[in-house]
Image (spheres, grey):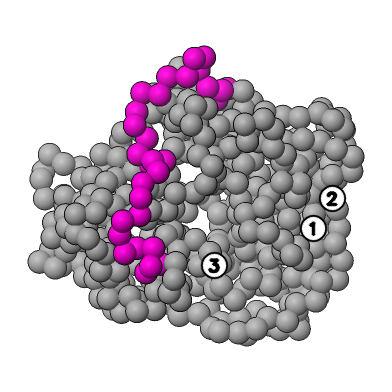
Amino acid sequence: MAPLVQELHFRHLIIPVTICRLVPVLPAGPIPVTSGDSLYLSNLDDMIGARVLTPTIYFFRADYLNSAKKPVMETLSDALACVLVPYYPLSGRIRETKNGKLQVFFGQEQGVLMIEAYSDMALAELGDLTVPNPEWSPLIYKFPNEEPYKILDLPLLIAQVTLFRCGGFSLGLRLCHCICDGIGAMQFLGAWAATARLGTLVTSPEPCWDREFLRPRNPPMVKHPHIEFMRVDDGSSLTTSLWQEKLVQKCYRITREFQTQLKTIAQTDSKFFCTTFDAIAAHIWRSWVKALDVKPLEYKLRLTFSVNARQKLRNPPLKDGFYGNVICLACAVSSVYELINGNLADTTRLVQEARIGVSEEYLKSTIDYMEVDRPKRLEFAGKLTITQWTRISIYESADFGWGRPIYAGPIDLTPTPQVCVLLPEGGTDSTGRMVVCICLPQSATARFTQYFYSADSNLI
């Protein structure tokens, strides 16, 4: 019988990559903006945490060497040019206006960027392609001397196609988070993939920009404290542990049975209902705090996670095809002592209360909060952020005509050590398994593994 929790390992390697050419891709037809025009970004698009080019990679075993189709690069670039007509905002650039507010600006001949590259390796030499590996980084393009977290004046989509000796290829993407959240990104990716696969423009649903729908109220009405954004002094040992020690990326495969066990342990009260995410997030948070041996015990820690607020908007509802950011940060708070000495059920209740607290009013209050007190930098003090990718169709959206990707997702969490990512397992027979990825100091990995493996109510 397969273990309920399995630590996954990736191969340490150096991938030789030759950049063959950089190809600007412009919309294949007329678009409703001209040079000098700009588009409004909502305060959810403009959050400090969204000011990144989110990297993802997709591996395909397709044998492009013996394929009767057009070359991979040509197929993908032609389809992308078609999709950029309805998704024309991606062909612009981000610029900063007064008070640090961002907008999309259109200049001459901007477009997105595709890169054709080649590696004299075979996919099999990359090791286990189901485990995100930081050493895949050469497969995602970065400009020489590019500054971290810089997005101003860069293409909003950068796509590197790397052809391997075996005939397989990878598609490494960097997509500006200001333009779309995870669900919006999958809508765009699905349109691009379907257009490449079918050879004609496919957009279902029709993309909707309409960021003005999420404008702040006048005057702004901040009705919640929004502790998720609160600036706090880092009076704990977390900074030393996570930012001054060498970090390693750890990945664990967890079965549906393990997820069910956690949920059962967390629901000690028959009147209390939690989701699988609530229980898993609580278990990760507690294991993380125990492994890092955070001090002092009375220090208040925060767990933040994104909640898709699309279905919360009812007055009026969001239009179909909207692909902007409609996510709210939920935030649970607990002391170190309570996390270590409490039980899983108590922590799960905190996560559940934070999740169900995200309402339509909470979303509007978030937008208004950003208007009156826009955070200027990311706040890491006492915080762990869990990002859930299991609810977005990252594998289903990426069939460009060469079948389902072997792997689809992020590669390297070490630049943001206080982030944990929950990923769907890529296999078609994964039966609900997920992969948990987290960065830890080397000194804490054994302890985290010990605590995380425990699904015994006497231990957690």
Callout 2–callout 1 Cβ contact below 8 Å:
yes
Asked if residue 141 lies left or right of residue 406, the reply is right
Q: From mark 2 to mark 1, how far is it between C-alphas?
A: 7 Å
| Residue 289, horizontal then vertical, whole percent | 27, 63
Using the image, tell me which numbered label, if any, was put on residue 25.
Answer: 2
At 89% from the left edge and 40% from the top edge, which residue is drawn?
Answer: 108
Indicate whether 360 appears above or below 76.
above
Sequence-first disc among 1 and 3:
1
Residue 390 appears in which quarter of the rendering? bottom left
User: Mark 2: few, some, or many residues within 10 Å (few <14, many ≥20)?
Assistant: many
Indicate whether 223 appears above or below 260.
above
Asked if residue 29 lies left or right of residue 143, the reply is right
The amino acid type found where label 1 is placed reads: Met
Sequence-first disc among 2 and 3:
2
- Residue 30 painted magenta: no
- Residue 225 painted magenta: yes
Which residue is identified by label 1? 114
User: Mark 1: few, some, or many residues within 10 Å (few <14, many ≥20)?
Assistant: many
Report the front residue among 340 and 378.
378
Callout 1–callout 3 Cβ contact below 8 Å:
no
* Span of residues in magenta: 213-242
Secondary structure of the residue carrying tag 3 is loop
| Residue 418, horizontal then vertical, whole percent | 42, 60
Q: Quadrant of the N terminus?
A: bottom left
Which residue is identified by label 3? 412
At 65% from the left edge and 79% from the top edge, which residue is drawn?
Answer: 123
